[in-house]
Amino acid sequence: MATEMVYQIKHVQKAFGDKPVLKDINATVAQNQVIALIGPSGSGKSTLLRCLNQLELPDSGEIDYFGKKLDLSQSRSKDDQTPAVGMVFQSYNLFENLTVLENVCLAPMRVKGLSEDEANQLAEHYLDRVGLAEQAKSYPQQLSGGQAQRVAIARALAMKPKVMLFDEPTSALDPEMVAEVLTVIKELAEEDMTMVIVTHEMNFARKVADEVWFMDEGVIQEKGEPEALFTQPQNPKTASFLNKVL
Ligand code: ADP
Ligand code: MG
């Protein structure tokens, strides 16, 4: 049997005003695949990721999610995401007045109707998984940026997503905290989580991704296995970008 496709992106276009931001995007994400989405600032990476989570709507084209057409007539708010799609942003967006544990419990209780006990158990499990079991009773202000981002990851995982979308998860972090967050994401990759990761961490993309998409000017200019794309880019635009960042 063919591998099940998590996403099939077909001819997706989007403009903001008269500025085209996504131009005829075609791509697929297979189950257990890890995609690294790279490219210069303003190239449309976040917009594409947000389309996958229906936070943005394409103007035209189609996105299939597990073989079913997504309803592209209405966008979601940031608080009302597809429960099966976990999203982690550059900013952690934790509730400052709730403990770490409560932050992770919130959605499982509110969205999935888990009891407090069930949610606590689940939250403890995922906090342990990101190495923060000891911080369960802390408040977000007491955490470092790296810890806060790991809580954000645990919070997403607690919804048992079928796919995780990361938008520059380490870009807001002090350099010494980048590794601890990348390690958690790498472990998820090793456990076969399906992921699309927008990142400027090229070494990470090269090591962890199954496939890299290079985006520029609203176009996926090149897709390929990391080794091939990083060492023998076929598109001069990819080569020029890599020259600047490597
Ligand atoms: P990237 O994530 O690659 O930096 P984005 O997807 O954030 O790129 O943005 C692509 C282009 O779309 C940029 O020119 C940006 O200014 C523009 N853009 C993004 N979001 C909006 C919006 N909500 N309204 C208007 N323009 C936007
Ligand atoms: Mg972005």
Image (cartoon, helix red, strand yellow):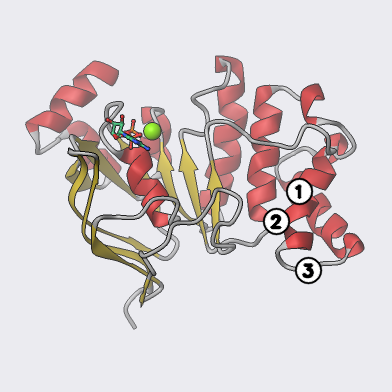
- 40 in relation to 213, above or below: above
Label 3 crowd bin: few (<14), some (14–19), many (20+), radius 10 Å: few
**Dot 1 amino acid type:** Val
Can you tell which mark lies on residue 158?
2
Q: Residue at x 79, y 53 (%)?
A: 105
Q: Are marks 1 and 2 in contact (CB under 8 Å)?
A: yes
Q: Residue at x 18, y 38 (%)?
A: 18
Whichever of labels 3 and 1 marks the residue nearer the N terminus, that label is 1
In the picture, which quadrant includes the C terminus?
A: top left
The image position of residue 100, as x and y in percent, is: 81, 39
| Ligand 1 position by quadrant | top left
- Secondary structure beneath dot 2 equals loop
The image position of residue 82, as x and y in percent, is: 54, 62
Label 1 crowd bin: few (<14), some (14–19), many (20+), radius 10 Å: many
Residue 197 in view here: yes
What's the distance in space between the residues labelled 3 and 1, CA to CA? 14 Å
Residue 124 appears left or right of 238: right
**Dot 3 amino acid type:** Gly
Residue 162 appears left or right of 60: right
Which residue is disc 1 drawn over? 104
Q: Quadrant of residue 70?
A: bottom left
Can you tell which mark lies on residue 113?
3
Is the CB–ligand 1 distance for label 3 below 8 Å? no
- Secondary structure beneath dot 1 equals helix
Q: Residue at x 27, y 32 (%)?
A: 39
**Dot 2 amino acid type:** Ala
What's the distance in space between the residues labelled 1 and 2, CA to CA? 7 Å
